[in-house]
Amino acid sequence: MAIFVSGDHAPIQPAGSPGFAGSAGIPGGTAEPSSSMALSVTRHAQNPLSDSFEFLVCGIDSLDLGLYILWNYKFSDFISKLDEKKQDAMRANGVLDHNPHERQFIHLAAGKPPNYRYHLQFPEYHLYLSITEKAEGSPNGYLSVNSEALWKYGLPYVLETLEIDLYHFGGTIERIQPSRVDMCADYRIPDGLTLPFLEAHRVSRAKETTFHLRHDVLETYYVGSPSAPVRLRIYDKDKEIHAKGTKFWFAEIWNTDDIAKVWRVEFQMRRPFLRQFGINSLEDLWQKIGGVWAYLTEEWISLRLPDNDRTARRSVLPWWEHVQKAGNAYDSAGGVRRSGQSDMLAPVEWYVSHVAGCLASVAARLNIDDCTEAVKVLGDNLEGHWRHKDFKSEVQKRSIRLGRISCDQEGGGL
């Protein structure tokens, strides 16, 4: 789910983007930019971000999912092809392939040890597959969704695309388990952040901190070890974008041509942390994401004034108060279908085209050359297929999986 919400006072919501135009419960953090682009440590201590910040957006920037895949037929043939392509990829920088609908993807040589031998790269995600046909105690597939796909198109679109891609390989998804979730909130901070400022105001359960400076200027501040179940990263997003040169599209998400002085607060949560919070499905994630953000920004770490000997009684910095309240946006954006996203799903025309191709194949096998008769025969067979199955329940499960409200919940159609 590409959950991201713009600030009340910042004109951040791009037209047609899959988010909310405003966020209830989040006070305005916008202020006139300072005439100086940098503050001394002393001035930071005197006025630690009381109003000199602008809330841009919050959301899930990175999402990895464990997939429990049911392979319907000819799994051994599929694995043989994957092995062949993997060998070819070892001799080249990936091997280009395509499905029956000419959707291209790449076979890569390196899998994801120790569980996933095969690596397929699609425009929206990386898909890793194991040699195990049946997923029992652990997933037999692993999905790593691209950040750009999450922000621009949303998770419902990505999951529907995945289901279509897996269908061509002979697989269907039985269950999805979140494995890694990166939640973030972006702010324009004209005066920037400094290492002494963060160190002086940090109150955290995690003891380990690291940082990266360039020419004595802070670029990244870490709380927690790289392998920890949860880790915080506060970093200069502008510097990262220019260093990598691949994420200038964030200007569209922020609805600005000026990407300077944007800082990101980002929590990386791995499977052990998600398990502790009972997050074992996407439904769990949407229901609990707001509470997780509250725990992380209020109990796990906070930035506070050194105005009391007892850290729990210290005053929370105004900027960090706003960071904490960004969780309200996650609560409201959780597992519901948001305005602007319904048109991001695969179009109905795709399914019509696919069924039309199946219709011709069915007609050929039954020796029927009349389209109307073939449609009736196919319709009768489809109805017979679902007659003894719970069609309504299946539709609701797929709706939830795609982050959409079911018919019963919404009181209408999907």
Image (spheres, rainbow, N blue to C red):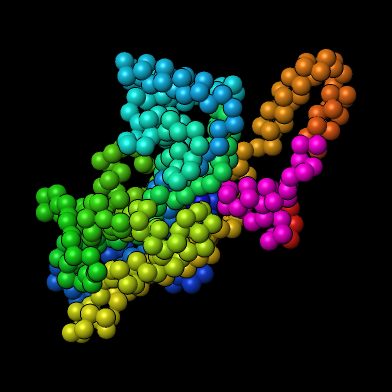
- In percent of width and height, residue 235 lies at 26, 54
Q: Tell me if 300 is positioned left or right of 256 in this view.
A: left
Q: Residue at x 40, y 49 (%)?
A: 179
Q: Tell me if 377 is positioned left or right of 407 in this view.
A: right
Q: Is residue 309 above or below residue 75?
A: below
Q: Is residue 80 above or below residue 173?
A: above
403 drawn magenta: yes
Q: Which residues are magenta?
A: 384-410
Q: Is residue 182 above or below residue 200?
A: above
- In percent of width and height, residue 76 lies at 50, 23
In the picture, residue 314 is in which quadrant? Answer: bottom left
In the picture, residue 170 is in which quadrant? Answer: top right
- Magenta: main secondary structure equals helix
Q: Does the rendering let one see residue 240? A: yes
Q: Tell me if 74 is positioned left or right of 151 in this view.
A: right
Q: Residue at x 72, y 59 (%)?
A: 408
Residue placed most toward the observer, 260 or 372: 372
Q: Residue at x 38, y 50 (%)?
A: 180
Q: Does the rendering let one see residue 340? A: no
- In percent of width and height, residue 386 lies at 76, 41
In the picture, residue 262 is in which quadrant? Answer: bottom left
- Residue that extends furthest to the left in the rendered view of this protein: 216
Residue placed most toward the observer, 284 or 319: 284
Residue placed most toward the observer, 374 or 243: 374
- In percent of width and height, residue 299 lies at 32, 72
Q: Residue at x 36, y 50 (%)?
A: 258
How many dots with numbers? 0
Q: Tell me if 189 is positioned left or right of 146 in this view.
A: left
Q: Is residue 197 above or below residue 169?
A: below
311 drawn magenta: no
Residue placed most toward the observer, 216 or 184: 184
